[in-house]
Image (spheres, rainbow, N blue to C red):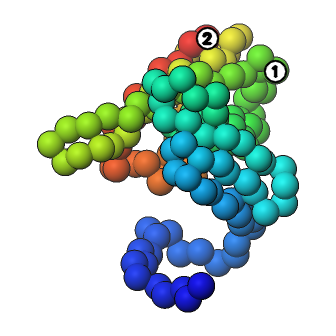
Amino acid sequence: MKTQTVITSAGAATITKVLYTGKVHVTGGREGQAKSTDGRLEINLSSPGTSGTGTNPEQLFAAGWSACFIGAMKINAASLKITLPAETSVNAEVDLASGDDGYSLQARLEVNLPGLSAEQAKAVVEAAHQTCPYSKATRGNIGVEISIAI
């Protein structure tokens, strides 16, 4: 198989060091399969709203963003000298939508920080939204709503 570069796009940030590269091979699109090169991920895919038994890209994106966002909150809470509750969680919803420009995404994150004050929770979430790579990637590209429950 011959490979040819067709489209490239520079990121907004200058990359000085790659920390990790996730490598996944997908066949069949939304009705296919995904498998990581290290064997840790091997799943069936199904289109949203169908009777298929697999997951879908929107669920995978929601899971990845939530996990990353919690990691960003941990780092930022420590620098703010705030103890992040053990029960910290994120409920994420990623919508596959359509409009005048075709298909697009929008997302809602509900961040649960039980036991923090409203001021502490807001500081941690705002800092995480500035540093989380998923938040950076979506900023200005899709509608995002973040709510906080304490």
Q: Is residue 14 above or below residue 110?
A: below
Mark 1: few/some/many CA within 10 Å (<14, 14-19, 20+): few
Say which element carries label 2: loop
Mark 2: few/some/many CA within 10 Å (<14, 14-19, 20+): some
Say which element carries label 1: loop
Does residue 89 show up?
yes
Q: Quadrant of residue 108?
A: top left
Q: Is residue 99 above or below residue 3?
A: above
Residue depicted at x 67% and y 51%: 34
Mark 2 or mark 1: name the one nearer the start of the chain: 1
Q: Is residue 38 above or below residue 15?
A: above
Q: Is residue 148 above or below residue 12?
A: above
Residue depicted at x 71% and y 11%: 115
Residue pointed to by mark 2: 150
Residue pointed to by mark 1: 86
Q: Quadrant of the N terminus?
A: bottom right
42 on left or right of 11: right
33 on left or right of 81: left
Q: Quadrant of residue 120?
A: top right
Query: Horizontal and vertical percent for residue 147?
Result: 48, 21
As drawn, the residue found furthest toward the right would be 39
